[in-house]
Image: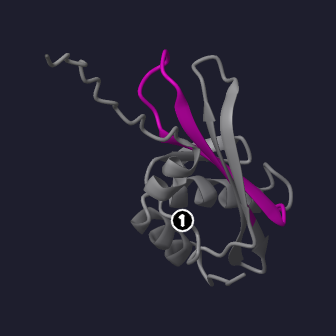
Amino acid sequence: MQAISDLNTFAKILTAKGYDGYFQTQGAYAGKLEDSISEYLENCRKGAEGAPKSQLLLTGFLQWAGDDKPYVECCMCVKYLNGKFFLHKMKVARKDQFGQLLKQTELTDLSVVTAPKAKEAIAMVSDAPEQKTVHRQKRFSL
C-alpha cells in the first residue's frame, strides 16, 4: 500500500487513470472524486457527520449507457489515516438494467499507483467479444 499525502494528488492520479466520472463518498456527497471526498471531510469538520471514518467507501459508475442497458459500477475502499489516503481494495461489477449482478471482480492489496485504468477495470467484467464464424457453403464438385 502506498500512501498519498494529500487529496489533490490522490484524485489527480485516479482521474488520469480514467476515474473521472461522478462518485459518492459514504453513500452521499455526489461529485467528482476530489469534490465528493472534500465535501464529506468538510461536513465531518463541521460536525454534521461526526468524526471522519478511517475507511471511506467511494462508489461510482465506470460505464453507463442508459436505464435500460447493463452498466459497470466501481466501489473503492480507501483508508484515511492522519490526512493520508490509501487505496485498499476495489470491486468492479457489471450489472444488468435491474441491478442484478452479471460479473464481478475484487482487487485487493492495491495502491493508487497500481490500480488498473478505468478501461482495464471495465474489460475485467465485460463479456469477451464473440468471434464471428464464417459459414462456408459446401459445394459439390463433379
Which picture quadrant has residue 60?
A: top right
The residue indicated by pointer 1 is 116
- Does the rendering let one see residue 107? yes
**Few, some or many residues within 10 Å of mark 1 (<14, 14–19, 20+):** some
Amino acid bearing label 1 = Pro
Q: What secondary structure do most residues of the magenta stretch adopt?
A: strand
x and y, in percent, of residue 77 in the image: 74, 59
Q: Is residue 90 above or below residue 123?
A: below
Q: What kind of element bears circle 1?
A: loop
- Does the rendering let one see residue 19? no
| Range drawn in magenta | 52-78
Who is closer to the viewer here, 26 or 139?
A: 139
Location of the C terminus (image quadrant): top left
Q: Is residue 120 magenta?
A: no
Who is closer to the viewer here, 108 or 138?
A: 138
Q: Is residue 105 above or below residue 37?
A: above
Residue at 60% from the left image edge and 23% from the top image edge:
96
x and y, in percent, of residue 39 in the image: 61, 54
Residue furthest out toward the front: 142
Location of the N terminus (image quadrant): bottom right
x and y, in percent, of residue 110 in the image: 69, 72
x and y, in percent, of residue 116 in the image: 54, 65
**What color scheme is it?**
one colour
Residue at 55% from the left image edge and 73% from the top image edge:
10
